Amino acid sequence: MATVVTRKWPLLAIAVVLSAATNAAEDDRYDAERALQLSQQAIGNPISDYALIDQYGQAVNLKSDLAGKPLVISMIFTSCHHVCPATTKHLAKAVDAAREALGDDSFEVVSIGFDVANDSPQAMAAFARRQNVGDERWRFLSATPESIEQISRDLGFIFFATPRGFDHINQSSVIDRNGVVYSQVYGVTFELPWLVEPLKEIVFNRPSSAGHLFAGLVDRVKLFCTVYDPATGRYRFDNSLFVQIAVGAGMILAVFIYLINEVLQIRRARRRK
C-alpha cells in the first residue's frame, strides 16, 4: 500500500491511499498523481441515475431514489481482506458521528461493489455484516459492468484488476442534494471533519430556507455553531461565538450610550450658563 500526501482541499490535508490486494508500487500501470488528478477533476460532475440492486435484492436508482439529501458513496470490493473492510469500519464510525451532529436522516450512504463478477447482493450483504454496519440507511449496492464503468467515470474513481485482486484509489465521494460530486474524502482512515464539513455545508444550506429570514438564520447559526472538538473527537453545538459577539455589541452600545449621555450633559451645562 502506498500513500501520497498532496495539496490541501479545502483547508484540510488530503491523503490519497492507493489500496489493493497487491502493492500499487509494484505495478507501473497505476499512476498515483494521475489518479488523484482525475479524482479531483470529478468534483462538479453530475452523476447519472444508475439502476442498482441493494443487499436485500431491491432495485435502487442512485439519483432519483436518493435525491434531495447529500449522499456519501464508497467504492469497495467484497473479496478484499484488509483495506476495504478497514475503510468501511472507519467510515461507519465517521457516519455515526456525522449523523449525531447533523441529524439521523440528514444524508444517505451507499457502498458500491465494483467487482461485478463477485459483488452480488448476497456478497454485499455478507460484507456489511462482517463490518458490523448497523445503519439501516446505509445501502450496499451491486451493479452491472456498464454501470460500474460509468459510475467510476462520474466519481473519478480509478481501479484495475491485478493477479490477486484490485488496485484502486481509496476514496469516498460526497454528492450534493442535486446529484453533483461536491468533495472527495481519501484514505483508509481520515480526520472526521474531512467528511462532516462538506456534509455540514450542504445540510445547512437548504433550498427551502432561501428567501425565508428566520429559517435562513437558523441554518446559518447551525452552520457556524456546529464545530469539531479535537478533545473529544466529536462535533458539538457551540454558541460561544455568538455570545462573544452579543457581549461585544453590548459593550459597544454601552459606550455609545455613555458618550451620548456625556454630550447631553455638556450641552445642558452650557445652557445653564
Image (spheres, rainbow, N blue to C red):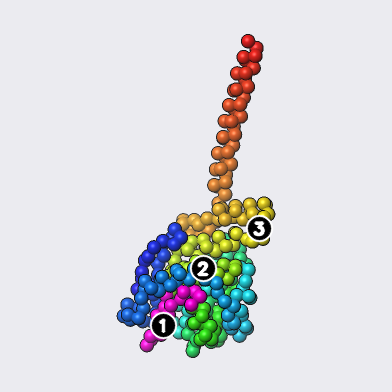
Does residue 273 lie above or below 157 as drawn?
above
* Residue carrying label 3: 209
Q: Which is nearer the N-term, disc 3 or disc 2?
A: 2
Under mark 3, the amino acid is: Ser
* Residue carrying label 1: 160
* Circle 2: element type: loop
Q: Farthest residue toward the top?
A: 273
* Circle 3: element type: helix
Q: Give the range drawn in magenta.
A: 153-169
Q: How far apart are marks 1 and 3 (CA)?
A: 43 Å
Under mark 1, the amino acid is: Phe
Identify which residue is drawn at 45% across, 68% down. 40
Image quarter where the N terminus lies is bottom left
Magenta stretch contains residue 150: no
Point out the frontmost of discs 2 and 1. 2
- Residue 266: image location, x then y, percent: 60, 18
Residue 170: name its quadrant. Answer: bottom left
Badge 2: few (under 14), some or many (20 or more) residues near its Cα, within 10 Å?
Answer: some
Comparing 26 with 95, the one in front is 26
Q: Which is nearer the N-term, disc 2 or disc 1?
A: 2
Comparing 216 with 96, the one in front is 216
Badge 3: few (under 14), some or many (20 or more) residues near its Cα, within 10 Å?
Answer: some
- Residue 237: image location, x then y, percent: 57, 54
Identify which residue is drawn at 50% across, 57% down. 228
* Residue carrying label 2: 44
* Circle 1: element type: strand
